[in-house]
């Protein structure tokens, strides 16, 4: 009789998975700023469903120990994760049914432990499939669709963050628009300005040191300080340049935030452009000239395609950085998800903070995943 | 024809190419030999103006190269760069087709030309055309570099150490291939090399370069028989001169009527190869055949030795 080989990672991960129901599954608060009280799965969804959950977890752990095919594991884990989230939503609704209207329910440590473990195993299973760009794109699309269905179906409507969202739907949509404009607008401006700058200083080595040093210096200024520094000159411009104020240029608001993010974006873009161009082999450049390519041809046919993966890597850094930093802009009235975070901090309302943090993290994650895909595709013909 | 007139390049006041004047006749292969840093690459690159001369001129078929627009000058001159310099993000076919593309050839014509060149260089188009440079062996990459330089049928071909990075066996083969295809092409070729044997084997004329000057610019025969300076004599080597001379001439030049036994020798083989064969097989005469195996006559040991003493 052969002993089936046991999957090692699963053996380790089975522990937190099976221990998770012992921890608090939910935090229950009589109102939005009260401290949370622990609630177990049994208290929320009753014993029959809790029994099913426990049995499910045990079966899952055993299946994971024995099942080695990554595709099967992926499907199993995705199903388990979906089921867990549905139970979470159900529990929140049931807990609220017995409580006053102001009461709030949020996920507790037990849920996070189980969900985190499942997510980790899922990522591992996916990595074991050695996915190409197409598979990664497909998984990303599935994940986005899954989250969209989850949010659209109202499964999680009972959770406290959803409650915060419902009273602020309009503000949330405005914040989304503002955040996108801040993060992507400053990135595009930096690209338009940074690429030619990179090209120029790569071809004129004398400029390289001063320009890169200046950009590095800007990068070291803390974001809040930079916002502050920009208030003075922009306020002056608004007051003294005719039409500037009408165009939205003010000491506070979107203009200084956009400019600050633009300045932060320059270093990665310029530095990577220069590094990418430097990495084009000399023989290749010389061959291009020797074949009779004009400067412009050489740029479009040779230099830019060979530098593209490095520029995309810079774009990824810049976008993730901007999405994060844009939250700070809320301090000077630029809008964006940061508005909720700072309001929430002011009111000590965790749910409101999360309403700002969750979409920021999701946006950053989504953007970096898409950029990773693009980088993989652009490097499809290795050098 | 390429004519260099007092061609000079100085870097920081130091002449790297120093008032070189020479003529490379139409359809010939001139080999420029010299040690590292002697200015070979610089000289070559002044012909297609990748390096602008400090003074002096290059005339191509009587036209001052300095007055032809850079881009069209270079599109008309094939260039095999030291280290190949293939475009890493393009397939072999696209690499080869780059100058025709720049010249605006229709796509079908480019594709046909690429196939023709690959076949001429003994590469299988079906296998190689779609490969990227990193998927090619050194020998294959070298051939793609040559094919790219030849694609638009240039009148002038510049080759900078085209065989430098190949192992001896592949290098020999590549040299043989070049010797063969250049007869079909009628292109004026300037080839830079470190290797005197390569220069002697391929060159119609040899320029020995040192400190930016031509120490001697002569036929291979004269380079061996009458080295102009100690440096040239050193490059050719004191010993084995007679054998090197024999290596320059084909069996056909001494073929005569008669009968001989045993394995025949090809009419295009060199006299030194024929002599080696005689020593190895203990014969004093060999039958001579042409490429089709047709008997043409014989070659004798006395004749070969006499030629070596001339
Ligand atoms: N752009 C440049 N600036 C300054 N010096 C240069 C430049 N290009 C070449 N040189 C110098 O000119 C000399 C000749 O260089 P070149 O490349 O022509 O030599 P080479 O004969 O081709 O050598 P190798 O056989 O090593 O390729 C060298 O001393 C080199 O350092
Ligand atoms: Mg050289």
Image: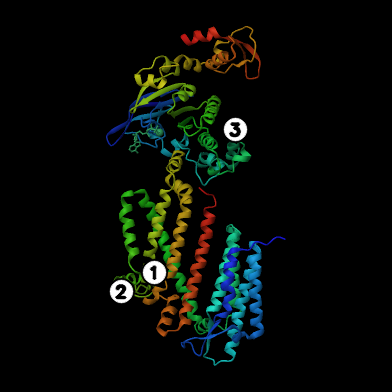
- Nearer the N terminus, badge 2 or badge 1? 2
> The residue tagged with tag 1: helix, strand or loop?
helix
Q: Which residue is mark 1?
A: A258
Q: Is residue A132 above or below residue A183?
A: above
Compared across the picture, whether B33 is left or right of A103 comes to left
x and y percent of residue A344 in the render? 43, 82
Query: What chain is tagged by disc 3?
Result: B
Residue under disc 3 on the same chain as residue under disc 1 = no
What colour-coding does the image apply? Answer: rainbow
Name of the residue lying farthest toward the left: B13
x and y percent of residue B12 in the render? 28, 37
Q: Is residue B106 above or below residue B254?
A: below
B180 or B152: nearer the viewer:
B180
- Residue A293 appears in the picture as rendered: no
Distance from Cα at disc 3 to Cα at disc 1: 60 Å
Q: Which residue is mark 3?
A: B122
Compared across the picture, whether A82 is left or right of A197 comes to right
- Residue at (32% x, 71% y) in the render: A225
x and y percent of residue A355 in the render? 48, 78
Q: Which residue is mark 2?
A: A235
């Amino acid at each position: 009789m052969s002993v089936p080989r046991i999957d090692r990672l699963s053996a380790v991960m089975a522990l937190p998975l099976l221990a998770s129901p012992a921890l608090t599954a939910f935090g229950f608060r009589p109102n939005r700023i009260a401290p949370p009280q622990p609630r177990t799965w049994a208290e929320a969804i009753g014993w029959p469903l809790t029994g099913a959950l426990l049995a499910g977890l045990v079966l899952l752990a055993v299946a994971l120990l024995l099942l080695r095919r990554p595709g099967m594991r992926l499907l199993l884990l995705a199903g388990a994760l979906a089921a867990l989230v549905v139970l979470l939503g159900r529990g929140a609704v049931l807990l609220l049914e017995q409580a006053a209207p102001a009461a709030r329910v949020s996920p507790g440590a037990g849920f996070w432990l189980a969900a985190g473990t499942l997510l980790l195993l899922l990522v591992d299973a996916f990595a074991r499939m050695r996915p190409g760009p197409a598979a990664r794109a497909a998984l990303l699309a599935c994940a986005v669709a899954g989250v969209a269905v989850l949010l659209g179906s109202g499964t999680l409507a009972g959770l406290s963050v959803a409650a915060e969202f419902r009273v602020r739907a309009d503000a949330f949509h405005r914040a989304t628009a503002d955040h996108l404009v801040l993060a992507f607008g400053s990135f595009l401006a930096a690209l338009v300005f940074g690429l030619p700058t990179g090209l120029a200083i790569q071809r004129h080595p004398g400029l390289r040191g001063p320009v890169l040093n200046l950009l590095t210096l800007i990068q070291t200024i803390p974001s809040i300080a930079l916002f502050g520094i920009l208030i003075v000159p922009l306020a002056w411009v608004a007051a003294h340049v005719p039409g500037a104020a009408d165009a939205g240029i003010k000491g506070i608001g979107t203009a200084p935030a956009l400019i600050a993010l633009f300045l932060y974006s320059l270093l990665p873009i310029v530095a990577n452009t220069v590094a990418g161009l430097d990495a084009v082999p000399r023989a290749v450049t010389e061959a291009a000239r020797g074949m009779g390519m004009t400067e412009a041809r050489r740029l479009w046919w040779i230099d830019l395609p060979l530098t593209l993966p490095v520029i995309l890597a810079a774009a990824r850094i810049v976008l993730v950085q901007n999405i994060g930093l844009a939250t700070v802009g809320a301090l000077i009235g630029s809008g964006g998800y940061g508005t909720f975070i700072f309001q929430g901090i002011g009111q000590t309302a965790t749910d409101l903070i999360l309403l700002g943090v969750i979409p920021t993290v999701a946006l950053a994650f989504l953007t970096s995943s898409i950029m990773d895909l693009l980088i993989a595709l652009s490097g499809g013909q290795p050098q | 024809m390429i004519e260099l007139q007092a061609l000079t390049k100085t870097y920081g006041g130091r002449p790297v190419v120093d008032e070189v004047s020479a003529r490379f006749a139409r359809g010939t292969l001139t080999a420029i030999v010299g040690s590292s840093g002697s200015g070979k690459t610089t000289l070559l690159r002044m012909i297609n103006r990748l390096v602008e001369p400090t003074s002096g001129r290059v005339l191509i078929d009587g036209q001052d190269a300095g007055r032809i627009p850079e881009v069209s000058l270079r599109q008309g001159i094939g260039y095999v760069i030291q280290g190949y310099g293939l475009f890493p993000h393009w397939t072999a076919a696209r690499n080869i087709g780059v100058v025709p593309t720049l010249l605006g050839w229709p796509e079908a014509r480019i594709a046909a030309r690429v196939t023709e060149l690959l076949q001429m260089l003994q590469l299988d188009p079906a296998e190689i055309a779609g490969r990227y440079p990193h998927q090619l062996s050194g020998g294959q990459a070298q051939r793609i570099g040559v094919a790219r330089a030849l694609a638009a049928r240039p009148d002038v071909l510049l080759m900078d150490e085209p065989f430098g990075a190949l192992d001896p066996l592949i290098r020999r083969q590549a040299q043989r291939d070049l010797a063969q295809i250049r007869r079909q092409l009628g292109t004026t070729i300037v080839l830079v090399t470190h290797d005197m044997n390569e220069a002697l084997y391929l060159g119609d004329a040899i320029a020995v370069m040192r400190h930016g000057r031509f120490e001697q610019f002569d036929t291979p025969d004269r380079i061996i028989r009458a080295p102009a300076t100690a440096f040239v004599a050193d490059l050719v080597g004191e010993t084995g001169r007679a054998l090197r001379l024999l290596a320059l001439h084909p069996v056909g030049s001494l073929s005569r009527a008669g009968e001989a036994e045993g394995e025949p020798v090809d009419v295009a083989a060199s006299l030194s190869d024929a002599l080696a064969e005689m020593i190895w097989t203990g014969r004093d005469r060999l039958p001579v055949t042409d490429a089709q195996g047709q008997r043409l006559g014989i070659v004798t040991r006395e004749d070969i030795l006499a030629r070596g003493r001339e």
